[in-house]
């Protein structure tokens, strides 16, 4: 699906570009382009996904780290 931005009345080109960039970010287009910028071997992709899942699991087990309060 193509992202389309129609100009609103009294809107400058800079404002249209800002809306377009926000839409691209919201759709995940910029993240996808960065990910596909260089070739990644399937084994590297699996290894990265495994590391990400381990980090996610550890984060869920430990929970947010709280700073001790000063008295």
Image (cartoon, rainbow, N blue to C red):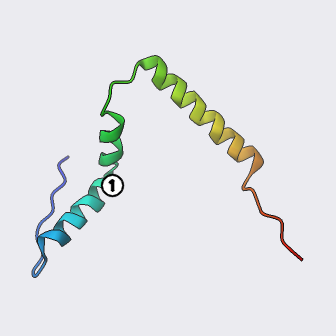
Does residue 25 sit above or below 46 in this rendering? below
Does residue 17 sit above or below 2 in this rendering? below
The percent coordinates of residue 45 (x first, y second) are: 46, 25
At numbered mark 1, what does the secondary structure look like: helix, strand or loop?
helix
Does residue 45 sit above or below 53 in this rendering? above
Farthest bottom residue?
10
Residue name at image x 19 percent, y 64 percent: 17
The percent coordinates of residue 15 (x first, y second) are: 19, 72
The percent coordinates of residue 33 (x first, y second) are: 29, 40
User: Which is more toward the observer, 71 or 8?
Assistant: 71
Does residue 26 sit above or below 56 in this rendering? below
Residue name at image x 26 percent, y 59 percent: 21
Residue where numbered disc 1 is placed: 25
Residue name at image x 71 percent, y 40 percent: 58
Question: Splitting the image into 4 quarters, where does residue 10 fall?
Answer: bottom left
The percent coordinates of residue 36 (x first, y second) are: 32, 33
Residue name at image x 78 percent, y 63 percent: 67
């Amino acid at each position: 699906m193509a992202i389309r931005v129609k100009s609103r009345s009294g809107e400058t080109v800079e404002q249209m570009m800002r809306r377009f960039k926000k839409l691209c970010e919201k759709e995940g287009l910029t993240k996808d382009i960065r990910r596909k910028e260089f070739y990644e071997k399937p084994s590297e992709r699996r290894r990265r996904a495994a590391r990400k899942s381990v980090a996610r699991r550890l984060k869920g087990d430990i929970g947010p780290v709280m700073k001790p309060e000063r008295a």
